[in-house]
Image (cartoon, rainbow, N blue to C red):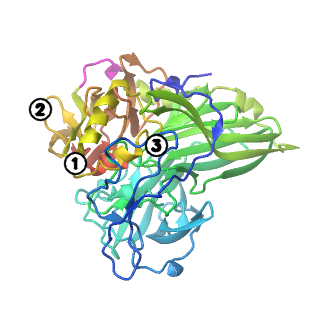
Amino acid sequence: MASLVAVGATLGVVAAHGQPTVQSAGDSSVDHSMHHGSAGTDPARWRMPPMSPNMPMPPGLEGMIPPQTPFLPGIGTDPATVPDAVFREVVELRDGDSIDLEAGLVRRTINGRTFVMYGFNGQYPGPLIKAPEGATITVNFRNGTEFPTALHWHGVRLDNRFDGVPHLTQEPVLPGGTFEYRVFFRDAGIYWYHPHHREDITQDLGLYGNLLISSRDADYYSPVNTEELVMLDDILIDDVGLFPYGQEDATQALMGRFGNVLLVNGEPQYELEVRRGDVVRFYLTNVSNTRIFNVSFGGAPIKLVGSDVGLFEKEVWVESVPIAPAERYVVEVLFETAGDFVLSNRIQAIDHFRAEFVAHEDTLGVISVSAEPTETSHRDAFDRLRLNTAAIEEIDGFRRHFTRAPDHQLTLDVEIGALPLPLLQMMAVDTLYYPPVEWNDVMPEMNYHATGANVRWIMRDEATGRENMDIDWRFRVGDVVKIRVVNDPSSAHPMHHPMHLHGQRFLVVERDGVEATNLVWKDTALVPQGSTVDLLVEMSNPGSWMMHCHIAEHLETGMSAVFEVEG
């Protein structure tokens, strides 16, 4: 079995196999109200965030609230007039076809409680769009939310003017406005779409959907009995309801907004029924704001097949799949005995107050395997670990660049402003035992005081000292660029970062001085705290493109830059 490191997400810790736990919705008995400003409705209110019962409140932070106006969707709207969301539909498109896609308010029921959230076409998740490799589709988008926005086609190497970045590739689509996207699918694989403005709110509340692009090669994947698309997410709910967001700036800007209710395809309990001996291909997508999942299937054997933009050079057996925000992984799982197999999130949580690591397991769902045998056995194909010769041959053309010196170095850092003194004191102590990644929200009360007004996350070009949007990188189509990303462990708040490049693909060729031995094309790569990661980027697509951290609150508080690729 491959370790977590071999999965390609060198995290520095191994997920412990603890006992399943039930997550609490938290205690919001303390309510510090602040008016939202919408007349005639009950206002959104700040209150203390849900806390683990084992985690005491840091002294001096009781009663403090963020400086932002609290926001929830649909203020001023009668919830009875909001349509109930329905589960996503599958839309199969061919080259030249079109689809209408509208973002708007929906009514969702989660664990028996009803909330006003967002959805595409009234669905959760948004429609699953299937199309063949090489196809171009037209998406007629309408914005029915309160925010100006645009749609980003994550991982898709399409025409730059349709990449969906407000003020860069297009003007924002205002509330009530429309925009026509032409989306070209250059690569087979699993992708997703989401807003690219205030995604800390709009994406977190349901605006996301998958794109499944089939290959021209009929043997691209091994045969399986069925395919399942799994979108991993979480949402923050307390006894009052949805926990508010900051209207002017993102809150929870240190660690990002962790939810306390985990969701699979928008539901708190995933269910699947298969037959004994079935092989299932799972397409995993992490759409959460900040949470890293570590997915396993109740002891069923897992074969790692692909990731963001294609297939691994060689298939490998793994015990679990760590997946950071915006990443995708393709795995095949054999269910060879009857019974229930738990889809779980096994992590090594940390209690920062006590400086303790705690084994933790969340039940995400159950795969029920019947005693009835499968109609068609694919056991022989499953048992073979394929060498993907096409992937190997394509990567061969880039191997001469693997060991050369980096062309650029980015250092990941943070600048802390005027936070409450007790919070600054806790942060000073916090850095003494920081883990490589934050598997859980270790201090919710501390985290939610950090906002765009007092935290600025930084990418710094070491050659020039320029930061974020002041970075000036220019390339030409055909360039192969090596970027070294260093996550500074001595920063004011060390934190992992899933780094995403728009419009291009890259290889993670080295982590902490160790060369990668099983490569796959990526568009998002996790950089743990204290790690150094070398990315080899194929500049294949002209235009002005973003690179940024895909923790939504880090993006909203500055952690992004633009690079130019000339045609």
The amino acid type found where label 1 is placed reads: Asn
Above or below, comparing residue 564 to residue 237 in the picture: above
Above or below, comparing residue 261 to residue 413 in the picture: below
Mark 3 and mark 1: Cα distance apart in space? 22 Å
Q: Are marks 3 and 2 in contact (CB under 8 Å)?
A: no
Residue linked to disc 2: 464
Q: Is residue 117 visible?
A: yes
Taking the spot 53% from the left edge, 25% from the top edge, the residue there is 14
The secondary structure type at the circle numbered 1 is loop
Residue linked to disc 1: 454
Taking the spot 46% from the left edge, 29% from the top edge, the residue there is 9
Q: Main secondary structure of the magenta part?
A: loop
Residue 336 in the figure: left or right of residue 327: right
Q: Which mark is residue 291?
A: 3
- First in sequence: mark 3 or mark 1? 3
Residue 368 in the figure: left or right of residue 327: right
- First in sequence: mark 3 or mark 2? 3
The amino acid type found where label 3 is placed reads: Arg
Mark 2 and mark 1: Cα distance apart in space? 25 Å
Neighbour class for label 1 at 10 Å: few (<14), some, many (≥20)? some
Between 40 and 412, the one lying in front of the other is: 40
Q: Is residue 550 visible?
A: no
